[in-house]
Amino acid sequence: MIAVKSISWTPPGAADAVLREVTFSLPEGAYAVMMGRTGGGKTSLLEILCGLRRADAGQIWMGGVEVTEREPRHRQVGYLPQDLALFPEMKVRRQVEFARRVRGALDDEARAEVERLAGELGISALLERRVDGLSGGERQRVALARALMARPQLLLLDEPLSALDESTRQEVGELLRRVGKAHGLTVLHVTHSRAEADSLAEVRLRLEAGRVVVE
């Protein structure tokens, strides 16, 4: 169970809060989709959940443990930002290893996990290629593999399909849902697309006027 309790946040220098006592919960293993207007605070909420941004008030609970004050690497959260935040000149193998390297030395078990994830996500043939030579769909798969290397309980996806063409969008969308189930992840997927929400969501959320409504 992921529980978000009364999260509030006001941008520095702003008069009004973007997030106002946001409260919701997601059952373990659910694929949730959140919609809302541009600039409404969806990305800021994801950054608060993964620890990249500090809320002004509220609590975040995962599996019955409060993680509000934990550093990102101690939250068991995987995050795919909209721009993917990949290093363009780095080879795919090192990109995927990155989540484990920031937690310490890369051991034989972690190297084997890179190979396993690469096979699962169809990127084994890309491991020695640079990211700047990959297609949009291939980059999404690399970013997903890197997120899974953190062994998350919660996977946060910020507009993961928005930059892809129609055929690739459908393929990657199906992959995200399949991987979420295979790894037992709770997924929170942010999108502007109602079609995405209709095809993927088990739980539908909407961020309106700074508050989350469960549809």
Image: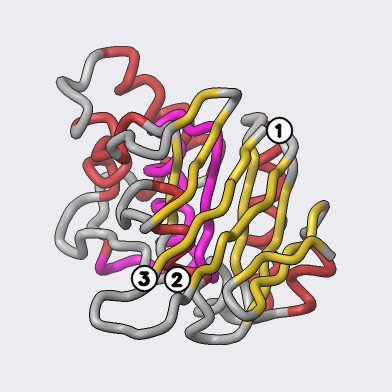
- Are the two marked residues, 2 and 1, in contact with CB atoms closer than 8 angstroms? no
Give the labeled residue for mark 1: 28
Which circle marks residue 83 in the picture? 3
On the question of residue 160 being in view, the answer is: yes
The image quadrant of residue 121 is top right
Q: Residue at x 35, y 85 (%)?
A: 15
> In front of the other: label 3 or label 1?
1
* Count of numbered labels shown in the rendering: 3
Disc 2 crowd rating (10 Å Cα; few below 14, some 14-19, many 20+) is some
Most foreground residue, 136 or 4: 4
Give residue 117's mark: none
Rendered view: 93 above or below 105 = below
Q: Which residues are magenta?
A: 132-159
Q: Relative to 152, say whether 94 is above or below.
A: below
In-front residue for pair 200/30: 30
Q: In x, y percent, where is residue 60?
A: 50, 41
How is the rendered protein coloured? secondary structure
Q: Residue at x 41, y 39 (%)?
A: 68
For marks 2 and 3 on the same chain, the one whose residue lies earlier in the sequence: 3
Q: Is residue 1 magenta?
A: no
Between 198 and 95, the one lying in front of the other is: 198
Which amino acid does the dot numbered 3 rest on?
A: Asp
Task: Tell me: 98 left or right of 204.
Answer: left
Residue 119 x, y percent position in the rendering? 51, 35
The secondary element bearing badge 1 is classed as loop
Identify the amino acid type marked 2: Gly
Pair 2/1: label in front: 1
- Give the residue pinned by disc 2: 136
Q: Is residue 121 left or right of residue 143?
A: right
- Mark 1 closeness class: few <14, some 14–19, many ≥20 residues within 10 Å: some
What is the quadrant of residue 205 in the picture?
Answer: bottom right
